[in-house]
Amino acid sequence: MSDDAVTPDPQEEPGLALEGGAMREESAYRVLARKYRPQTFDDLIGQDAMVRTLRNAFDAGRIAHAFMLTGVRGIGKTTTARIIARGLNCIGPDGNGGPTISPCGTCEHCTAIAESRSVDVLEMDAASRTGIDDVREIIEGARYTPVSARYKIYIIDEVHMLSKAAFNGLLKTLEEPPAHVKFIFATTEIRKVPVTVLSRCQRFDLKRIEAEALIEYLQAIAEKEGAAPERGALGLIARAAEGSARDALSLLDQALAHGAKAEDGTTLVAEDEVRDMLGLADRARVLDLLNLVMEGDTAGALKELGDQYERGADPIVVLNDLLDLAHWLTRLKIVPEADDDATLPPEEIGRGKEMADRLPINVLTRTWQMLLKTLKEAKDAPRPLAAAEMGIIRLAYAAKLKTPDEVIRMLETDAPLPDMPDPPGTGGSGSGGGSNTPSGSGARSGGPRAAAKPQPVAEAQSMVMLRTYKEVVALAEQHRDIRLKTELEDYVHLISFEMGRIEFRPAPRAPGDLAGRLKTQLEGWTGASWAISIAKEGGAPTIREAREDEWAKAVTAAKNDPLVAAAFEAFPDAQVVDIFEAQDDFTSPAPGNPEFALGDDDDEDL
């Protein structure tokens, strides 16, 4: 960052005012965002790609007739537009210079543009002037040459707010403008600008400023203002600004006013004071809260949430912080180098690594989904704190629950399912009331009846992810929706599956409401939103078709066995059957019963 980046704007310094017939120095305070507005491209931070492109274009004389600047609020779009205008019209201190990426700031045109009094550089706010009549003024004015400058420049801010008629009226002039006219547009909503306009402009996407660069920038400005901020305080400001230089300077302005004065006159800006000013929960305490939740300590988690609320933390902000923390821990789990965050102290990074190593990825993703749902509920609730507490209870209750894939593996191995735990601190003995191991012939290991066991994990299924289509079928059977389970096996030619989305081609005999019922049931069972798409072509064989094909191959292989072939030669009418499926059709499960036989009378001869 250049030292000039923190040089006050000379045009923003206190001027002179007339009072009682005499001149006096104006003492009105200038906010930092205006006082330190960049005057050249060297002053801009975080926009190296755009500056490099413009520098090369100016040096080569390949200057576009229209520029489109887009980015979030406070990133520097209007400031960049004014710097481009100065560069286009700058004539240098000697009056003989040409267009330059580094305007001198002293020639008549640079000075006039900086003071917003140049008759050849016209700024228009499209938020207040949206109609075709306003654009007609531009079209008519573009016909005339500049009064004194090199180019007549039109800067239109928030251009996406122009009406459709205004955009259409501007198109012809924008496509073939006179040689002496340049357009510079700025917008925060680039998707609302018609593509016909975008295609006629050279587009620059201004990036959010990285946290480290923003902290260094704030540090330099604070020193110019005679302040001594803690780095943690600047980190909080940079994080709250979300990459916006103007927002960061406004928050720094507020922090300087909030800070205490030292004996030497220096303004002290403490991290705790900035945290209180922003209404943020202590990130270390947010880590404590999430840790209590992951340990299933409901009472401790509620107490911690209540303490943060008493200190002034907004429940919505706490939930947002928990969401950010869950996302950060997941990134640490997948990408260990994600710990390179300039806004976090080393001790928090160390705690984050420890939690990421300890928590499984499925628990982290489940936590994210549940927090996202809780945040929406809290925003809609009349009492956000109550909604946040309910979400914390659900999270703590689900912390030790098995996920569907774990349950399915236990069912396949015929392992006993654990009882549902009572919420910690209730002193209960579990909702299961004893062993969950089912009885009856339908519970054999690995068989199609295995998923019909009791459902101690029904609560967990509203909080977890499904990774395969077969888990969807197993979930339908576990919830005893046999009709849906049968239709999913018989009528679905699967095209693609991912959590929250299924695409399939229905078989000819599939019910017309299959997709709708599947969506409703999945959203009720998983607690997540699902998109069910229907295609006319493609898709894999249905589960039943695949099963029948596999069975046909098995029968063919069996018949090719010499012993089986000899048996068929001795008994020509014999059939190959699945003895496990046949056992499920016994009319009486009691061994020794005289009627203990297959359901078909013909089978008694076997």
Image (cartoon, rainbow, N blue to C red):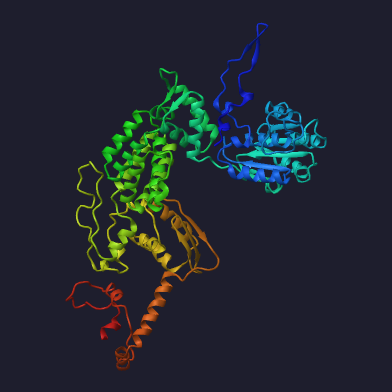
Does residue 459 appear in the picture of this structure? no
Does residue 5 appear in the picture of this structure? yes
Question: Would you place residue 260 above or below residue 499 in this image?
Answer: above
Question: Which quadrant of the figure contains the N terminus?
Answer: top right
Give the percent coordinates (x, y) of residue 269: 42, 26
Question: Would you place residue 38 above or below residue 260 in this image?
Answer: below
Give the percent coordinates (x, y) of residue 533: 51, 59
Residue at the image point whose x is 58% and y is 15% from the top: 27
- Give whichever of 21, 108 is nearer the camera: 108
Give the percent coordinates (x, y) of residue 73: 57, 36
Residue at the image point whose x is 55% and y is 24% from the top: 31
- Give whichever of 122, 227 is nearer the camera: 227
Question: Which quadrant of the figure contains the C terminus?
Answer: bottom left
Hey, which quadrant is residue 577 in on the image? bottom left
Question: Would you place residue 195 above or below residue 435 in this image?
Answer: above
Hey, which quadrant is residue 78 in on the image? top right
Q: Residue furthest front?
A: 94
